[in-house]
């Protein structure tokens, strides 16, 4: 259906380097599939670049601000260029972890107790996770177990966003569920070898185990899948997303919704897709065709 595809990557966010890797992997897959693909490094002149390129379709491989927050989606809507993933509204909501939690909590989705923090002295309970409300790749995220460490964690999160989210730390099993075109992919149990699943654990080879044997019963797995799809449909990102949870043995606590998950061959969504029978190239083709 589409011939010339612009792969939008790089960008202006703190996740630029991760995005470049995603873009490179996507372009390689598109080349193998026979598409005419062009890498487009997103900067302040992106509108001019797109008008000159005149792509039939844009594959958004951007992470973070200006990529996942609805802004690039809005530009593509104005230019009349089809693109992958969630629309403007869904992207904007999912990118803001606070808005996501408020919306989903209102329909009965379980999420860790949370509040917006405006002061380094605003410690309401411990232990907690302190994070920028609008950031990805666990950038600026800290686990705080003592009051003396809270101020430093608050200042770290504040470097990346004026909106700082504090949520109760839940001890449990971290699980992630990918969804592509309404199809729920096999869940993955994320098991860091030390500490929590931070930036280093995500992107340093050998520091984290990714396990499909989640230890969940059939009933628990069904509940997790149903909850994931419900979340995706409410936000409007069932065409492409990855949803993260913590499971304490009783409840699945929503952590966040990623509308443009990493798409290198070693990223979580492609791992889950491969488990479901889709090669990396098949996954990229499936995302583009929407089937």
Image (cartoon, rainbow, N blue to C red):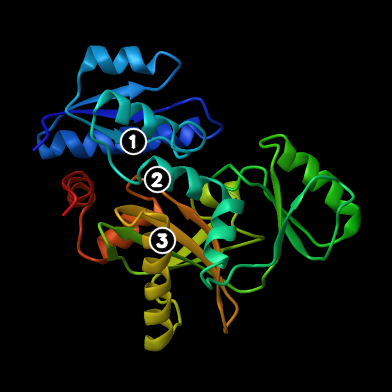
Residue that badge 2 annotates:
260
Instruction: Point out which mark residue 234 bears.
Output: 3
Given residues 75 and 243, the one toward you in this image is 75
- Give the Cα distance between marks 2 and 1: 8 Å
Q: Report the number of discs.
A: 3
Element type at marker 1? Answer: strand
Picture coordinates of residue 75 (x, y %)? 36, 26
Contact between labelled residues 2 and 3, with CB atoms less than 8 Å apart:
no
- Give the Cα distance between marks 3 and 2: 17 Å
Contact between labelled residues 1 and 2, with CB atoms less than 8 Å apart:
yes
Q: Where 233 sits versus 154, above or below? A: below
Q: Earlier in the sequence, mark 2 or mark 1?
A: 1
* Residue 191 in view here: no
Is disc 3 surrounded by few (<14), some (14 to 19) or many (20+) residues within 10 Å? Answer: few
Given residues 10 and 105, the one toward you in this image is 105
Is disc 2 surrounded by few (<14), some (14 to 19) or many (20+) residues within 10 Å? Answer: many
Q: Where 269 sits versus 19, above or below? A: below
Element type at marker 3? Answer: helix
Residue drawn at point x = 56 percent, y = 67 percent: 106
Contact between labelled residues 1 and 3, with CB atoms less than 8 Å apart:
no
Picture coordinates of residue 81 (x, y %)? 24, 29
Q: Dividing the picture into quarters, in which one does residue 248 lie? A: bottom right
Q: Where 114 sits versus 213, above or below? A: above
Residue that badge 1 annotates:
60
Picture coordinates of residue 153 (x, y %)? 78, 47
Quadrant in which the N terminus is drawn = top left
- On the picture, is 219 further left or further right than 253? left
Residue drawn at point x = 29 percent, y = 30 percent: 7
Q: Dividing the picture into quarters, in which one does residue 183 lie? A: bottom left
Picture coordinates of residue 67 (x, y %)? 44, 34
């Amino acid at each position: 259906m589409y011939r010339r595809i612009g792969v939008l990557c790089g960008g202006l966010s703190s996740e630029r380097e991760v995005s470049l890797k995603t873009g490179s992997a996507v372009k390689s897959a598109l080349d193998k599939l026979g598409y005419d693909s062009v890498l487009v490094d997103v900067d302040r002149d992106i509108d001019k670049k797109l008008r000159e390129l005149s792509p039939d379709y844009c594959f958004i491989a951007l992470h973070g601000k200006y990529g996942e927050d609805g802004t690039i989606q809005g530009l593509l809507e104005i230019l009349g260029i089809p693109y992958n993933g969630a629309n403007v509204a869904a992207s904007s909501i999912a990118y803001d972890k606070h808005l996501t939690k408020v919306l989903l909590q209102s329909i009965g989705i379980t999420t860790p107790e949370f509040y917006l923090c405006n002061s380094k002295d605003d410690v309401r309970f411990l232990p907690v996770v302190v994070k920028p409300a609008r950031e990805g790749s666990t950038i600026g995220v800290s686990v705080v177990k003592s009051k003396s460490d809270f101020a430093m964690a608050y200042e770290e999160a504040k470097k990346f966003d004026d909106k700082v989210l504090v949520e109760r730390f839940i001890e449990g099993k971290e699980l992630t569920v990918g969804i592509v075109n309404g199809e729920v992919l096999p869940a993955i149990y994320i098991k860091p070898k030390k500490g929590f699943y931070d930036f280093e654990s995500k992107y340093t080879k050998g520091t984290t185990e990714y396990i499909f044997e989640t230890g969940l019963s059939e009933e628990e797995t069904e509940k997790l899948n149903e909850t994931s799809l419900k979340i995706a449909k409410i936000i409007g990102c069932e065409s492409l997303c990855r949803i993260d949870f913590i499971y304490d043995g009783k409840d699945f606590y929503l952590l966040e919704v990623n509308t443009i998950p990493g798409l290198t061959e070693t990223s979580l969504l492609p791992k889950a897709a491969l488990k479901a029978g889709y090669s990396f190239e098949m996954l990229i083709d499936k995302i583009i065709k929407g089937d």
